[in-house]
Image (cartoon, coloured by chain):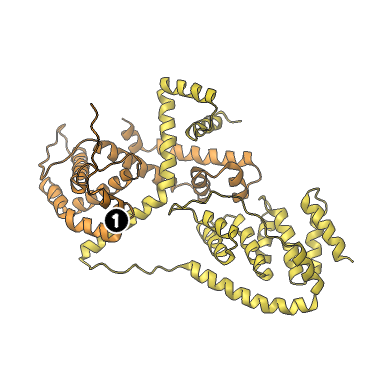
Chain colours: A yellow, B orange
Amino acid sequence: MNTQQDHYEQIEDYLADSLSDTERQAFETRLHSDTNLARQVNLHRQLQQAIVQEKGDRTMQQAIQQAAKHWEADEQPVGRTIRFQPKIYWAAASVGVLLLSAVFFGVFQRDNPSAQALFDEQFVAYEAPVLFRSTAIDTLVLQKAYVAYQDKAYVNAIALFTETLHQNPNQIVPYFYIGQSKLAMGDAVGAIPTFQTVIDHKNNAYVTQATWYLALAYLKIGDRESATAQLRTLTQRQDVYGKKATALLEQLNK
Amino acid sequence: MSQQQITHPDALLIDHFREGDQTVLKDIYSRYFPGIKQLIQTNRGSLDDAKDVFQDALMVIYRKSLQPDFTLTVSFYTYLYSVCRKLWLKQLRRQSTRNEVAITDTMDFIEDGIREAIVDNEQYSIYQEKFRLLGQECQQLLRLFMEGISIRNLTEMLGYNSEAYTKKRKFLCKEKLVALIEHDPRYKDLQE
């Protein structure tokens, strides 16, 4: 392992108070005699505070500048500026797609009851990572998105995951959870391209899961052939997804 | 002999100020900017200088007020004046060829802790400026890590293939950030 990486991790462990008593005492002995180490520890400590505070500080700077403008213009206090809130529009768009999809699904479900039954039997929304729920005003959009998803507030989760994609279009994980949210709401048509995006990206930890849920989404719309194709790619796996895919294929081929 | 600090009644003002309350901020401008403008213009500064110093001072006070051990023991205006005064003195010293720079004061001020508050503010400004130069992935990773998200959860949240990879990415992002900071001449000046 890289020595400098070890060094950084030791400083971080010290600041997080996660060194053992022996390690901490040894580290503090070095700290008292090594001014360079002391400077680095102080820098890491300040960096942590500065990064956690960054969004709040930026908000405060903007608030001060806004107050300065108002004072300079000698304006009376006005109401809050109405900002364009893309979340509302994304939420509305998602609800619209959901309604259209419900009509679309109704047609397919009439023709493929057993595929729907298989979907209902197999679908369980993917469990998101357990997170510390921060009440800080500057909690990241991504954290809020996960919390919304965990709370099954899927419309909100979709809007928030979409916002993180606007901030950083190179992410892949939000596509997976947007797909999960849509599928949980019954919008398999909307979920399919998002899972496909995760699979096409290849270099991420959600490819297998996305393949499984893509198969389920195809089942939901009655496309047994596409569902089968996805499940076949999983049957070679030795893990839980391989076993589930094999079992589901057997049911599909009955 | 230690003296117990007595909190000034303006501590309540600090609480609202810290929230970025627009009414409080506009009130601060109305009440205190004229006095600061007088200080700066009396000491060879322009109106724009006064505006810049006032805004910088408010950020110094904001960041200081976030520290858990901060207690306002003088009036908000005295504290604000003291910070503005120190900021303007620093500016005058940069512009002057002489060692000593005199300033004509318009009211009482305090010295205790003001220089440190200004240095901290400048350091944080540099750290955050360099942080915003990192790529979005690094910013997200470091922000989540600094907020206390475990490596295990980070790996899952960000879709990385292993915890070892997450740790490596975190280290590389932080190493780049530290290098950006340490190469900034303003950071070096602050260390002296």
Residue A246 rendering spot, x and y as whole percentages: 84, 56
Q: Residue at x 52, y 51 (%)?
A: A133
Quadrant in the picture for the C terminus of chain A: bottom right
In the image, is residue A41 above or below residue A186? above
Nearest to the observer: residue B97 or residue B106: B106
Give the vertical position of B68 relative to A217 (above or below): above
Q: Residue under mark 1: which chain is it in?
A: A
The percent position of residue A41, horizontal first and vertical second, equals 44, 31
Note whether B46 is above or below B150 in the view shown.
below
Quarter of the image where one finds residue B168: top right
In front of the other: A165 or A93: A93
A107 is higher (above) or lower (below) than B155: below
Is residue B181 toward the left or the right of residue A185 in the image?
Answer: left
Q: Position of residue A26 (x, y in %)?
A: 50, 21
Reading the image, the residue beneath label 1 is: A64
The kind of secondary structure element at disc 1 is helix
The residue lying at 16 percent from left, 41 percent from top is B109
From this viewpoint, which residue is outermost toward the right?
A: A254
Instruction: Indicate the quadrant where residue A110 lies.
Output: bottom right
Q: Is residue A221 left or right of residue B110?
A: right
**Mark 1 belongs to which amino acid?**
Ile
